[in-house]
Image (cartoon, rainbow, N blue to C red):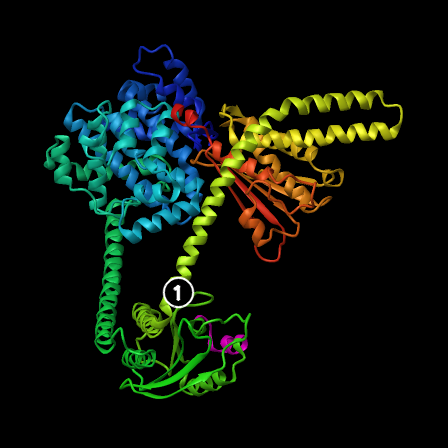
Amino acid sequence: MSGESGQSDAGGGRLPELGPAARRWLALRSVEDAGLDEALGLLNNDALLREPVLSWCRGLAGPSAARVTTPHRAVIIVGVPGVRTAVVAVSSVMALGGMNAAGPAIDPDGYWTHALGVGAMCERLALAAGDIDPDEAALAGLLHDAGKALLAADMPEAFAQAMELAERRARPTSVALREVLGIDHHTVAKRLAEAWRLPAAVRDALWLHGQPPEAMPASADRRLAGLVSLAKAWARTNHLGWSGEHGAPGSVADLCRAVGIEETLVERAVGPVLETVRDRARALGLVQQGAGVDPLAWSAAAASRKSDELAARLREVTNASERSRRLLGAIEAFHKTVRLEDEPTKVIGAIGRSACDLLGVGRVAIVWQTPEARDWSLTLVGASGQAERSRRVERPPDGAQIRRPADLARAHASQVLIACELGWLAKLLEHLREAGTPALVGAGAVGDDPGASCLVLAPVPRAGVDTADLEPVSGVWAWALEASSRAASAVRLGEELAQTNRALAETRDELASKESMVRLGRMAAGAAHELNNPLTVIRGRAQLISEKASTPRQREDADAIAEAARQVSDMVTSLHLLSSPPSPRPADCDPMLVLRDAIDRARSSVPPEAQKTRVRINADGAVSIMHLDAELAAQALAEPIANAMLARPGGEVHISIESEAFSDRLRVRVIDRGPGLSDRALTHAFDPFYSEQPAGRRAGLGLARTRSLVDLMGGSIELANNPGDIGGAYAEIILPQAEARKRAA
């Protein structure tokens, strides 16, 4: 589209730009403006823009529509404001046309039907009110949901997630967008209006519509914002197009009173508004000429779809209510049959009786294990709750995938047999499978979790029973078995209490030791500060000796002294940074230059064999100018990069870098293909002086220094091993822009 492409940055997101014709027309106010001839020339020379604008203007010209054949005649007949609104409206639709590729989260036809309907109603009511600019009202109504189109195009997956959340919880879309994306469509539309230099009243309407007047800033144009809220409520009430909202629409009558417009004006405007929607849809090229857009047909179809959705949801709620009633009845009956002091075997009988009733079977098998027992037990229980027979059974070997009885409910029967290799279980499942696929309901602890655990095995349950729905009841079963097991082992509580007291005493000793270490660290940092001057002298003298040495051996000894002094000096610097962190000095910087500086620092700090490691940078995501302390950021990134080089010297290190849209954050991930991090390293990697490198290779202060710098800049750092069989580890650093930049924006 001629003159309407291009992108600009605003507030961390990618915003489309208006073409030169639209920007020039926005600056005009009347026919006396000196730039009118230039604006007319720009419009005349843009064929794709000229015809839709003239078609829009014909809709404003009434009986004189046939005379609107050129931009100059359009200015004479409908005036500069009318032509200006038409130019900006058509240019806006062209600029936002990329939303058509945003995915299923937005229906483009429904979106524009809704936008045109809100804009036409705003324009009609503004004319009736007399104190609101109808051209600004039409533009504000047309663009009131532009933020949704931009977010859907920029972050389609996250936007779709937010829309699903809003629909599922029947919440305002703005609330769901802030929860998922950290920003809502009102704020994005405000940034768009500011970037396009739209009138202040239009900007306020895009930003503040939907809010009550008393919640708006005193400086805002509340009247136009209220008018957009009224027009949107009317369009949503009549299912006109796709609004992207799932909560209840506002009351048209209440909004009329708030804006000061008679409700009858809305009713009388409906016919002309629908006709205007048809005409402007053709003018904007949203439909083929002659095909027509029927807002009433759209409204009827949308209302029918909504009715079907509500009916389906009502059926789901009814079915869920019936299931809940049955489950609550089962829970109540179960509570009446068990007591806290009952033995675990009696509780197992009550569980079996409850399961028989819910599943509609005459007998179940229960595999169970109490918290303190290592062995598993198998008990057959009838519908009366009487245990027919019970015995201990073989449990899976140590290290098996299946650890607790409840784990068996997570897998298909055939997979269970393969995973467990338990002969008794195979026979039991084979017996149950004679009637079809057996039901397996787990309750209680799974995996390595402590606590009671059990599995209920039954023949095929009655029709309409889903074992997944039994989770609330199985939770009650698990609680009863756990409580009974704990009560049965009350004799051992004294020993546990004594162990707890000993643990508390050890904890107090450990805390006292840590406090001593803190004081020692402060003393060490203070002493280290005083070592700088002697170390400087040592390094200087060693360099002089090296220069004047008469033999290679003397030169090597002098260089070794200088290198040792440098290492101690680096340790002193790190200790000083940990004890007295510097104050960040943020400024605009290029993150790619900061990253390359960090790579150079990392290479200079590793042995020669690690310096040969190749570093590949992936900057597929957008990397824009950031407001950071470049020096501190480079220091923070250097250590993870150096560690990645050391993980596999001579190999490859991959670094990805991107600026997150709409969040003002820089994300850097450093990935190596080394042996990965041990569990101990993942726990203590940020502890001062901790290192798994050979003695003398690394001081163990690098990651502690990196974390201190990242915390100082308000960011975060995470270490983890790569998933699956890839091997190696990664470090992810997230740095936000400085607060001063955010306030300025």
Give x and y (percent) for residue 196: 38, 25
Vertical placement of 311 versus 110: above or below? below
* Residue at the spot 56% in from the left edge and 44% down from the top edge: 731
> Residue 439's image quarter?
bottom left
Q: Name the residue under label 1.
A: 496
**Residue closest to the eye, 534 or 439:** 534
Give x and y (percent) for residue 112: 33, 40
What's the amino acid at mark 1? Glu
Give x and y (percent) for residue 382: 31, 87
Q: Residues within 10 Å of mark 1 (few under 14, many from 20)?
A: few
**Residue closest to the eye, 654 or 44:** 654
**Residue closest to the eye, 338 or 181:** 338
Does the segment drawn in magenta span residue 646? no
Q: Specify whether 382 is left or right of 574.
A: left
Give x and y (percent) for residue 303: 23, 52
- Does dot 1 land on a helix, a strand or a loop? helix
Give the extent of the magenta segment: 410-419
